[in-house]
Amino acid sequence: RQLRLSLSAKKHQLPYIQGPVPLCTATSHNWIYPTDDKYPERTYQLEMSESAILNNTLCSLPTGLGKTLIAAVVMYNYYRWFPQGKVIFCAPTRPLVTQQIQACYNIMGIPERHTAEISGRVPNTSRKKIWDTKRVFFCTPQTLVKDIEEDRCDASKIVCVVVDEAHRATGMHTFALLPNMIEEAGAKFRLLALSATPGTDIKSIQAVVETLKISKIEARTEDDPNVKRYIHNREEEVISVKQPDVIKILDKKLLEFVRQPLEILRSVNAASRLMGDSANLSPFAVMKAQEEYVNRTGDQRMYHTFQALRTLVDIRINLKNHGIQYALQNIARKEMDARG
């Protein structure tokens, strides 16, 4: 059973700017929200869903309180409104991707024949066909960026992107590349960012907001009256962990590797944006330097050097922020994506 919610033209008109993908006028005057005994209506989920449909929204909810449902609602309605468009869910791990696939099938009833999970395990030739024939996609950001860069995915047809674990969307993560890449393709799209912990301070939250071009923040804490009734009692303890010496040693060695492609780029005047301390580089800064150099010179010969630098910087930051195991997993993902 589904509840059809009509949107008044005055207060809830879909803020639509004509783009490459036409809007279906027969369905765009309303949006659909599920009501079922299995998914009883929660006020905060309804409010956050409506906000996310009408604005580029950062939704922050404690773990286990239904961000998956909100994402499914937004994805389903953009799937309805843009029959020729692409709706994409991006998460950094396959378990999160699988969780969202189940929500889209079971909560909103998106037809399975219109969906696809894409990963580096799928051959390049097959991925091109999948992007051309399906409408709703589930993938990691690395896969999406690679397929846009290599023209397997027509980014101009993207109408909605949901980013899970959005707190990663800073200069150190592939998430940071997506909004500009999709915009540059000419797409007009909605972006929904999900996170239980969008940042540890105002500065880190602002970085996510700017990177993902967020226009509205919807945050609910465990003390919110509409949320509190769904919270189970628990205790939290903050444990500060000293960075192991082995990470310091590996970081020093990685920094030596970073300096090698950086010096090559500087020698051909391709790194005017990267003249500061190499220890403070971010993948996003490297990407912007590459864009600036190519726009200024038209020279693509430094492409692989820029890519090597960006990869090394990304690995180094992952090592420092998340530890050896995460850095190794990140390297493995990059190797898999590189093999296609």
Image: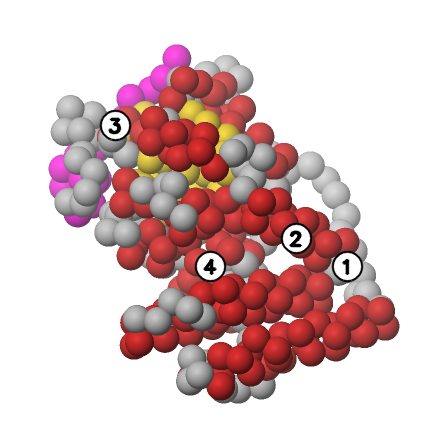
Q: Is residue 110 left or right of residue 4?
A: right
Name the amino acid type tagged 4. Answer: Ala
Q: Is residue 3 magenta?
A: yes
Which residues, given as a range, are shown in magenta?
1-17
- Is residue 71 in sight in this rendering? no
The quadrant where residue 287 appears = bottom left
Q: CA distance from mark 1 to mark 3?
A: 44 Å
What is the quadrant of residue 243 in the picture? bottom right
Residue underneath mark 3: 83
Q: Nearer the viewer, residue 291 or 93?
A: 291
Q: Residue at x 70, y 57 (%)?
A: 327
- Residue 5 lies, with reference to residue 245, above or below; the image says above
Q: Which mark is residue 107?
A: none
Tell me the amino acid under the disc marked 3.
Pro
Residue 324 image label: 1
| Mark with earlier residue (4, 3) | 3
- Spatial CA span between label 2 and label 1: 10 Å
- At 29% from the left edge and 77% from the top edge, which residue is drawn? 296
Gap in angstroms between the C-alphas marked 2 and 3: 35 Å
